[in-house]
Amino acid sequence: MSEQLKPLCGVLDNVLERLAAVECRLGIKPSSGPTTASSAIAAAASPSAAAVVEEDDGELHPRLAAYDEHISRALTPFTDSCTALGSEMEGVGKHITEVWVGVRLIVELGTKYKKPSDLGVAIQPHLKPCQDAMSAVRSARLDRKFDWHLKSIMEMLACVSWVVMSPPPAPSTFVKDTIGASDFWANKVRKEYKGKGEEGEKHTKFCDAMKALVLDLSAYLKEYHLSGLAWNAMGKDFSEAKVGEGGGSAATTSAAAAPSKPAVAKPRGAGGGIFDELKKKQTGAGDSAATGLKKVSRDQQTWRKEFKKDAAPPPPQPAAVPKAKAAAAPKFGAKKPLGPPKCEYQTRGCKWNVENQTKDTCEGGVCKVTVADPKEQVYIYKCENVTIQITGKLKSVVLDSCTKVGVVFDTAISACEVVNCKSVQVQATNLCPTFSIDKTDGIVVHLSNEGVGTSSFVTSKSSEMNVSWADKDGEIKEAPIPEQFMHKLVNGSVTSQVSDLYH
């Protein structure tokens, strides 16, 4: 080797030492090739210089070892906090353990196989243990006091999807971001049980342990899965992977995480002794205590229907007395019956009250009201299928909640008001300065020749409004009262115009 290459060899030796350290950290057994730059240059021409990656014999991969440490360090305290809250939450804690063990199987596959081309499709069958456990948590029926606990857990379980994601963002960042949604419900639990002694401390410990679990998983991913699930570039093709492969160590981890319970001896009663005796009489050839018993043929099965035909008929039962039918309850939305009809004058207020009138309560379907003083007013309420004929000059007319009613009056000094009515007609044979129509569907206003140029209309929340009058030739004309308008903002004020539909 020339003297000019010696400085370069020193730099390369330093690089090779750092690469060897990285190989040890990733669990890759270094090849038995050259370990210095000098020997590497000497062996460069040899075709056998390629490095060979071998699987560790009997040694746990560093990624798996670190994941097991994460389970014992963060998952076990969380499941213990669930157990402390009662048997219902203890079952949820077991399902969470199953989720984490299922993720461990995926991490183990990454240490043995190459990354598949379509990760989402290839890894889907191996995710079934995680999905089943998460479905069990989602469908758990717990006491109402654990509603916030369960919602917080479901938000936390979103972090498990790091195994199928690819950056950006990095898996560690994605997992840490789930803390916000989980803490939204966990903070409600902390507030609810704050200052409630030992019971409150159990719930607070549950919230803290869940947050610590997510943070510890984020730290693990930042160290070992920085850019997504790590795979073995020198491993086997992923198509050779079998569902549930590598479950031995995962089962050990699950058993270690689950709290152990003492076996409970089953009580031995009379039934237990009988079954034990029958089992003892069973031979190796499959014969049991029932072997050799006579079979009961069909004609000896007296419990069948054909054997009951010859039997004496049962004594006749006394006829049941029919119960009186209860009054049918009124259906929802059914029309309520009208009250007693009224047509009376009240001196106080100078008002005529016409209520609950129909064509059956009035002679000829016409209710007549005679007004003697112009100060009087007529109030018509809840009338149906009737005509109200008002004679004389009056102050005002009010129609309220009427259906299919016709009102004829002479002169109204103030106004005619129509409120909450359907299919009504109003006729002023002389003058009425204002017609006020509110919340009414279907109304026709008939004007006299004197009222054509003087009457005005005020409408709101109403539809199917029409006005009728006679022209100079005596022909009846009818026009709709506009319901649709076009509004504009002009110079800081809103202007309105009738829609083109009415032009």
Image (cartoon, helix red, strand yellow):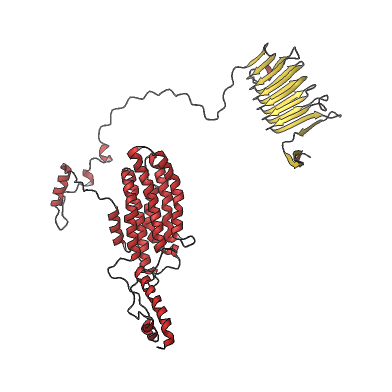
Q: Nearer the viewer, residue 477 or 55?
A: 55
The answer to whether any part of residue 480 appears in the image is yes
**Above or below, comparing residue 167 to residue 294 in the picture:** below
Q: Nearer the viewer, residue 250 or 136?
A: 250
**Above or below, comparing residue 379 to residue 458 in the picture:** above
Residue at image coords 72%, 32%: 465
Residue at image coords 13%, 48%: 277
Residue at image coords 26%, 37%: 308
Residue at image coords 73%, 40%: 487
**Above or below, comparing residue 228 to residue 449 in the picture:** below
The percent position of residue 294, horizontal first and vertical second, equals 16, 48
The percent position of residue 345, horizontal first and vertical second, equals 67, 12
Which image quarter: residue 111?
A: bottom left
The answer to whether any part of residue 235 appears in the image is no
**What residue occupies the far right of the structure in this picture?**
472
Q: Nearer the viewer, residue 148 or 339?
A: 148
Which quadrant is the C terminus positioned in? top right
Which image quarter: residue 355?
A: top right
Q: Is residue 181 left or right of residue 380?
A: left
Q: Is residue 430 left or right of residue 329?
A: right
Which quadrant is the N terminus positioned in? bottom left
Q: Is residue 105 left or right of residue 277?
A: right
The percent position of residue 457, horizontal first and vertical second, equals 75, 29
Which image quarter: residue 141?
A: top left
The percent position of residue 371, horizontal first and vertical second, equals 73, 14
Task: Tell how many labels.
Answer: 0
Q: Nearer the viewer, residue 147 or 405?
A: 147
